[in-house]
Amino acid sequence: MPSAQTPLATIVHPTDFAASGASAFAHALKIALVAKSQLCLLNVRGEGDAAPSRSGFRHVRDILVNWGMLGPDAQPDSLERELGLRLSSVSVPAANARTGILDFLDSRPCDLVVLATQPHKRLAQWFDVSVQQGVLRKARVASLFLRGGAKGFVDMRTGALSLRTILVPIDDGPASVAAVRRIEARVKLISPRASIQLLHVGERAPELVDAQGGSLRLPAVARQGPVVDTILNFAAHLKADLIAMPTAGRHGLLDAMRGSTTARVLDDARWPLVAAPMD
């Protein structure tokens, strides 16, 4: 059972350092700073292409200078020495970005992957179904999706973090308990004062207990209506900063593909979204 001290040892952020992914980059960096994690910047290049000339450290340093956390002449060792941040940059060749990212996640276990998505680009298309499902099943990792142009919980100018209210949709199955506890532990690690609101789409909110009879003891409400619309409408009513969706852990990222509630919420949402494996 994860506790409030559950570490985020490694965070992976696929990036090409483009402006369109600036929000996701800022969120990955801020979470790594707060959690004292290793941040791995992953660049997927075409097969036969040279590695990018811009270094991950320089990009991180430029952001931290703007946030007032480092001086402009800071050296790479200052990240860990002064800020407790361990940074690595990896560039891998692949036939396409989807395959490169998923192969990397399969070979390098991590605790969180932070991904940028674009408006009008469905998650199901981003994780192309042509990718081997065996790879997808192995990529059982919590994933934070940031949509370009949408409001996040990290101010890109200042680095200020504002994560106060998290909406977690639940069903009435016991498998949700582990995912919700994991979400709570990780949220508290990043923002100790954040509150979690459980939402059940149905007639009555279930009381979720684990195998030992322990209750989640988190506020839960029930709302009726179409599942995706109800989640999004309640998120707006709650003024949520983040939606966290428990997903089928044995399928990992496969659950976030075509037809899943998680994918449909992300397609329509104006909020950052976490997909958290149930097991």
Image: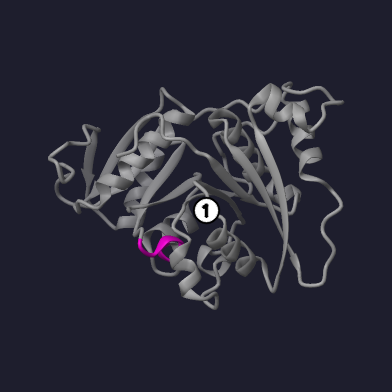
Q: Position of residue 96 (x, y in %)?
A: 68, 71
Q: Residue 241, relative to residue 232: is it above or below?
A: above
Front one among 66 and 83: 83
- The residue carrying mark 1 is 109
> Of helix, strand and loop, which mostly describes the magenta segment?
helix
Q: Is residue 277 magenta?
A: no
Front one among 117 and 203: 117
Look at the image and tell me in which quarter the N terminus lies: top left
- Label 1 sits on what residue type? Pro
Q: Position of residue 166 (x, y in %)?
A: 39, 36
Q: Start and end of the magenta stretch? A: 250-255
Q: Quadrant of residue 236?
A: top left
Q: Residue 78, relative to residue 88: is it above or below?
A: above
For the point 83% across and 55% down, the residue is 52
Residue 108 in view in this figure = yes
Q: Position of residue 116 (x, y in %)?
A: 61, 52
Counting other residues with Cα less than 10 Å from the Cα at mark 1, is it few (<14), some (14-19), or many (20 or more)? Answer: some
> Helix, strand, or loop for circle 1?
loop
For the point 75% across and 47% down, the residue is 19
For the point 63% across and 31% down, the residue is 155
Q: Position of residue 25 (x, y in %)?
A: 66, 43
